[in-house]
Structures are given as C-alpha cells and as structure tokens.
Image (spheres, helix red, strand yellow):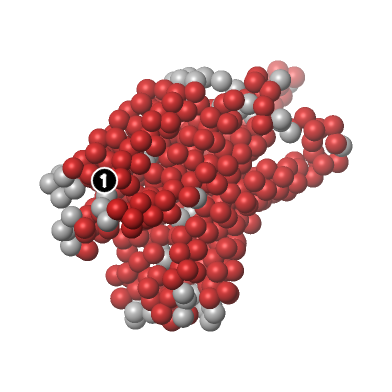
Amino acid sequence: MSTTAETTGALRAQAVAVDDGRRARRLGWLLAVAVAVAAFNLRPVVTSLGPLLHRVRDDLHMSATVAGLLTAVPSLCFALFGFAAPALARRFGPTVVVAAGTGAITAGVAARAFAGTTALFLLLTALALAGVAVANVLIPVVIKRYFPDRVGPMIGLYSMSLSAGTALAAAVTVPLTRELGGSWRVGLGIWAVAGAVAVLLWLLTPALRRDGRDEAAGTAAGAGQAAERRLPILRSPTAWALACFFGCQATGAYATMGWLPQIYQDAGLSADSSGLLLALTMAIGVPVSFILPNWAARRGDQRAFVVALVAFGIAGYVGLALAPAGGAWLWALLVGLSNCAFPLTLTMIGLRARTSGGVAQLSAFAQGLGYLISIPGPILIGTLYQSTGGWYLPLGFLAALLVPQLLIGLRAARARHIEDEVG
C-alpha cells in the first residue's frame, strides 16, 4: 500500500509540474504579445502627426515656430521622462510602469484629437510622449527580467514591432483619414484603438500583479536592498559609450525621417515617390530589427555589426549626395539598414548589465542622454540646407557623423558588464 501511495503521489506531482510548465509557457506567450503590441504603439504618436501637420496647423492656428517645436518635443520628452523611469520601476515594478505608460499613450493620443487650442494639443502630445519615454526605457527591463535566456529574440520582437508601428503610421494615416471622412482629428485619434488593445493585454498579464507584490516586498525590506540596486553608472565607460552611440544613431535616424523626402523632391522626384522611398527606409527595419538582435545576442562582442551598419550609412549618404535620383531605391535601402543601429543599441543595453535593475539604469542613462544629444542634429541639417541651398554639406555632415559613431560603437560593443566597471 505504501508503495502504491508513493507512486500515486509521484504521478500527481509530475502532473502538477507538467501543468505548471504549460501555464508558464502560456503566460510567457501572453507577456511576449503584450510587449509586441506595446512596442507597436511607441511611434504612431509621432509619425502619424507629420503627414497631417499642415491641417492641424491650419485648424488650430498654430504658428510655424510652434510647429517647429513639435519636431523637437519627442526627443526632449524621451530624455526627461526616460531618466525618471528607473525610480518609477523600483517603486512600482517595471511592468506596472509600462502598463501605465501605455495608458498615457492611449489617453494622450485619444484626447488630443479633441484639443481646441495649440497649448492643449501640445500638452496632450507631451502626455503621450511621456508614456512612450518610460516604455522605451523599461520594456528592455521587462525582457531582461522575464526572458533572461531569450534577450536577443525578444529584443528582436520588440524592435520589429516598433519599426512596424513607425512605418505603418507614416504610410496609412493620410489614406485612412481620407476614408474616414477627411478630418485630421479622426486620423490622429484612430491610433488610440491600438493603444487600448495594448492596455488590455498588459492588464491581463499576471506579471503585472507579480511585479506589484515584488516591489512592495522590496520596499518593506528596507533601504539596504534599494541601495544595492543603484549603480554609480556615471563611472562606467561602457554606459557613456552606449549613450553617445545612441545619440549618434538617433541623430541620423531623425534627420532621415525629417529630410529624406525633401532630398528626393529636390532631385526631381515626385512627392508620392519620395514618400514611398521614405516608407522603404523605415520598412526595411521591420525584418532586420527582428533578425539583427538575434545574431548580435549570440556573440559576446558586437563590433562587426557596428562596422557593417556604419558602412551602409556612408555608402547611402554618399550616393544621396552624388546621384540622389539615379540610385534612389538603393540609397533608401542603405540608409534604412544603417538606421538599424537602433535595435543593435537596445540589444547591447540588454547585454551590458547582469540584472534587470542594471538594465533599467543603463537603459535610462543611454536613452536619456542619447536623445538629448540628438536634439540639435535635425535642426542643424535644416540650417545647413537653408544656408547653402543644397544637400552636399548636410549629407556630408551625416556621413562624417558616422565616424565618431563607429569609434564609440566599437567601445560600446565589447563584451563588458557595467557592474564590473563600477565595482
């Protein structure tokens, strides 16, 4: 009887273990989908506005100065609110803050569609961008915490979804607005639907409740544990290298998004063709953003990828300067590949710290400082274009910027952990 009872107990324990494993896999899939849908919502707040900006300006009587300010607001918000993300994550848990950030994106995008004044439109846009900022920083932290053995594939999924949201919002906002009656308010507000789906998924994710309990327990454990989580990150050369690398690539990416259509139109291409070329530049990031982090995470050292992406960029900018119309599709493809330094940077952030807390601090520092570095770039490109009347000097500046990006990237891409550097 004893043997039979022991056998029965063992079988039951085995069945429970199997059920627990299946449940864990289902919950893992749910969190992965939540990450992907949240990432999809991180750029439409910006890229859906550009094609409709002239209508917004006319309706709200927005000055050209304020419209120019709108182009700098994203980077500024990403920097300021991104720096606050680690403290919020320590207090509430990263999944809780990402869920709240997704809610802020949804609320801001939906509410600004009803804004009757320029000031209110800017305020609600800033609310949405604040949500984007904390999610930018903390989604890699969620990946490090819940997918420690799948950092590369999950960063790839995150980057691919982000690129897809960026490209889709830029490509379909105008025709979608036309189909829905022609009002810019509907064209901008419709993107809140995708945000609402993301909020629902995060609310259904058990990790949300687990993070809340864990962080509450961590707070009760006292200041000693909290102090252990904070790193003197300013003492890490790798952190500084990642921040400067992020700033260089963001400068090139935002300059491309802002000015590439104008470059092609000045070369004689139509507005429709220039729009398609910009869409290609962004769309190429969808598959590459999924594949590249997987490849990069399998290697301890990512320097070969840094070199390849810089080479693509130099070739693309030189081609745009010398024969913009002759090889238009090739230059758009090369510049798009060069802009895939963004998912590479996210991958390196996830690999350069040992813990999710370290990733939170490194992500906030690298992205916060990096976005601040990137703010003057697109403005400088416009100034050079206006003063010279051509694109040789602006494109030469972007090509030259890839040299420090290469040198800094070679330092950031070495197999290091910031915890080892700061002791």
Residue appearing at x 75%, y 19% in the figure: 2
Residue 385 visible here: yes
Q: Is residue 219 left or right of residue 341?
A: right
On screen, 123 above or below 313? Answer: below
Residue 350 versus residue 319 in the image, above or below: above
Frontmost residue, 415 versus 157: 415
For residue 236, what is the image quadrant? top right
Query: Which amino acid type is marked by label 1?
Result: Tyr
Q: Is residue 140 left or right of 301 when viewed as pictured?
A: right
* Closest to the observer, 385 or 354: 385
Task: Give the farthest residue toward the front.
Answer: 387
x, y percentage for residue 84? 67, 48
Between 260 and 298, the one lying in front of the other is 260
Could you tell me which residue is drawn at 74 percent across and 32 percent down? 229
Q: Which residue matches tag 1? A: 392
Specify the quadrant that holds the C terminus. Answer: top right
Percent position (x, y) of residue 302?
43, 24
In what element is the residue under mark 1?
Answer: helix
Residue furthest left in the image:
326
Left or right, 191 with reference to 173: right
* On-image quarter of the N terminus: top right
| Residue appearing at x 18%, y 42% in the figure | 322
Q: Nearer the viewer, residue 382 or 125?
A: 382
Above or below residue 166? Residue 415 is above
